[in-house]
Image (cartoon, grey):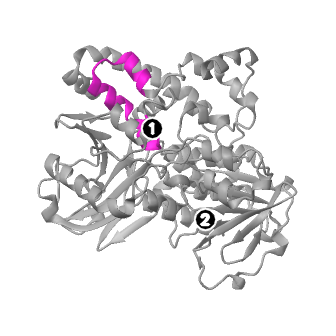
């Protein structure tokens, strides 16, 4: 049915407008208006999307305040420090680094002055249940040789697949990732190229068109799991990741992903942007269809001309905005939407260095399609699993005490619509992962384990206010993409905007940074915004004593 709907829109094709993105050369030289003269912008959440949005709005001339409900900055990119070990809580795969570099350029700075990005190779070591190994890199010849080891006849198919991935990348990322989809006609404009690129196929379906060997199919189709999607349901648009990684590589921030967060916060401090922690927004206040500010859990009210939510978009609509103010995103529509899987994450340190473990390892279990059906469709916790193992100390040994290693391993699991009782299942499941790693990759793990910390779907709901405990918000299927996703500019409330995984273009570091870039197009210039707050801002001394100011 969806394919017929897409085809019906072909005749309505018109030229898609280009985004009016900020010019770093122009804006970095411009002096902002005096603070009291600027319209006020409040950003809810200090994840990468929120911090990027705060920088862009500040550069454009808004008086920006970032509110973070947790005690530390970073949202899902916060850092756990335990007994000398440093663990990045969330994103670890850095691609499209120019999106980060642009934020520094907007402020007249260079990313390299704050953070060192170091390329990682192989991108991933993929290990199968029978202990066969595929080293996934950005080197074309090395990839051909890896594929030849499994299936010589698939080498030509791989070349054809990469060529198709490049074509999808040029449309899906270069042309559309930074473009807002505010109207149905915006969606219809992209129908012809999307049909030509076979976006109605799934990721696995497109890979299978070119590749015959099952293990190679799995290697080339696992990427949607890194952004919350099932390869057997996610649109083949996401195969653009293969070319994106080939083009720009996979990187790691020395000091951990948290070093990027601290670098962004340093930029905000230089621009006099306030970042408050332990400041939980309980309601986005609306009057006459327009946002007027926020009310904190403490009872404090903050007026604003615009509000940008970097929180989970489903949670924001469902719990922070009264039902009478949201016609499009009713409780019923939110509840009936499809949400990404959740994650079980185990952070652990060892008193031994595991030199055989690469920086990024994908461990694929004995089942692929069947396991994904258990997670996404049946929502049952299976006895087997596929895992992503992160060993940052491969690249930066300073993240663990001398002679030690730091890891985190995550397992895709059902979100909270499943029947799993994590209050009684957590330790049993952690032990099963530990036993698997010990048997297949990390001998003696149980003897060398020094620190241990877990995050379950309950934690995603509690810590990040993630709807149903999903790890990546709305599932990235075609029926929930672009115009069919919560818009970057709210359909219901004037002056309300969204960044992050739950809006366009979606999850992953390039996605959330691109969502902030969309604001350049949809948020009005400060000169045309009506200021309702700047002259009424309370003095800094009125902040509650429990609220930290970065």
Q: Which of 164/181 is in front?
A: 181
Residue drawn at the location 81% of the way across and 51% of the way down: 494
Report if residue 186 is visible in the image: yes
In the displayed structure, does residue 306 sit left or right of residue 124? Answer: right
Tag 1 or tag 2, which sits nearer the N-term? 2
Disc sitting over residue 377 in the figure: 1
User: x%, y% of residue 338?
Assistant: 55, 41
Disc sitting over residue 263 in the figure: none
Disc sitting over residue 268 in the figure: 2
The stretch in magenta equals 204-230
Mark 1 lies on a secondary structure that is helix
Relative vertical location of residue 299 with respect to residue 406 in this rendering, above or below: below
In the displayed structure, does residue 466 sit left or right of residue 285? Answer: left
Relative vertical location of residue 365 with respect to residue 405 in this rendering, above or below: above
Q: Quadrant of the C terminus?
A: bottom right
User: x%, y% of residue 419?
Assistant: 42, 51
Q: Which of 155/31 is in front?
A: 155
Report if residue 273 is visible in the image: no
User: x%, y% of residue 307?
Assistant: 72, 59
Comparing labels 2 and 1, the label whose residue is closer to the camera: 1
Most distant residue in the front direction: 419
In the displayed structure, does residue 52 sit left or right of residue 12? Answer: left
Neighbours of disc 2 within 10 Å: few (<14), some (14-19), many (20+): many
User: x%, y% of residue 242?
Assistant: 41, 31
Q: Quadrant of the N terminus?
A: top right
Q: Is residue 218 magenta?
A: yes
């Amino acid at each position: 049915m969806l394919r017929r709907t897409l085809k019906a829109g072909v005749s309505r094709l018109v030229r898609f407008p280009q985004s009016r993105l900020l010019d770093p050369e122009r804006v970095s030289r411009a002096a902002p208006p005096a603070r009291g003269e600027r319209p006020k912008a409040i950003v809810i959440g200090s994840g990468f999307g929120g911090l990027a949005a705060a920088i862009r709005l500040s550069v454009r001339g808004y008086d920006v305040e970032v509110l973070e409900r947790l005690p530390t900055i970073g949202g899902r990119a916060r850092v756990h420090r335990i007994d000398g070990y440093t663990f990045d809580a969330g994103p670890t795969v850095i691609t499209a680094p120019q999106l980060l570099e642009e934020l520094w350029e907007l402020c007249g700075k260079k990313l390299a002055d704050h953070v060192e990005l170091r390329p990682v190779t192989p991108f991933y070591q993929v290990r199968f249940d029978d202990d066969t190994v595929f080293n996934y890199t950005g080197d074309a010849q090395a990839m051909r040789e890896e594929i030849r080891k499994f299936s010589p006849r698939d080498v030509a198919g791989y070349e054809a697949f990469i060529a198709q991935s490049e074509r999808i990348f040029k449309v899906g990322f270069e042309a559309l990732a930074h473009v807002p989809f505010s109207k149905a006609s915006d969606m219809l404009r992209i129908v012809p190229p999307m049909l030509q690129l076979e976006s109605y196929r799934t990721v696995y379906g497109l890979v299978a068109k070119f590749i015959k060997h099952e293990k190679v199919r799995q290697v080339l189709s696992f990427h949607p799991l890194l952004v919350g999607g099932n390869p057997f349901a996610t649109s083949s648009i996401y195969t653009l990741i293969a070319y994106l990684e080939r083009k720009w590589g996979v990187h790691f921030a020395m000091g951990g992903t948290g070093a990027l967060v601290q670098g962004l916060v340093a930029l905000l401090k230089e621009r006099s942007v306030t970042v408050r922690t332990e400041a939980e927004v309980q309601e986005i206040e609306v009057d006459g269809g327009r946002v007027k500010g926020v009310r904190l859990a403490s009872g404090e009210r903050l007026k604003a001309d615009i509000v940008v939510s970097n929180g989970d978009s489903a949670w924001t609509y469902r719990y922070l905005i009264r039902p009478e103010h949201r016609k499009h995103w009713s409780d019923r529509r939110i509840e009936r939407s499809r949400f990404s899987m959740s994650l079980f994450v185990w952070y652990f340190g060892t008193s031994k260095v595991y030199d055989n473990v690469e920086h990024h390892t994908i461990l694929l279990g004995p089942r692929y399609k069947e396991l994904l059906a258990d997670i996404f469709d049946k929502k049952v916790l299976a006895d087997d699993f596929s895992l992503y193992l992160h060993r940052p100390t491969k690249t930066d040994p300073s993240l663990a005490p001398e002679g030690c290693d730091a890891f985190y391993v995550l397992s895709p699991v059902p979100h909270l619509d499943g029947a799993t009782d994590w209050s009684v299942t957590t330790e049993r499941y952690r032990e099963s992962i530990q036993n698997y790693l010990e048997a297949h990759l990390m001998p003696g793990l149980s003897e060398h384990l020094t620190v241990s910390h877990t995050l379950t779907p309950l934690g995603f709901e509690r810590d990040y206010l993630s709807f149903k405990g999903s790890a990546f918000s709305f599932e990235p299927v075609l029926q929930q993409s672009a115009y069919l996703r919560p818009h970057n500019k709210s359909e219901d409330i004037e002056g309300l905007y969204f960044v992050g995984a739950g809006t366009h273009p979606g999850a992953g570091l390039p996605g959330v940074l691109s969502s902030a870039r969309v604001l350049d197009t949809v948020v009005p210039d400060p000169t045309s915004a009506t200021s309702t707050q700047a002259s009424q801002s309370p003095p800094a001394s009125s902040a509650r004593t429990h609220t930290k100011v970065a």
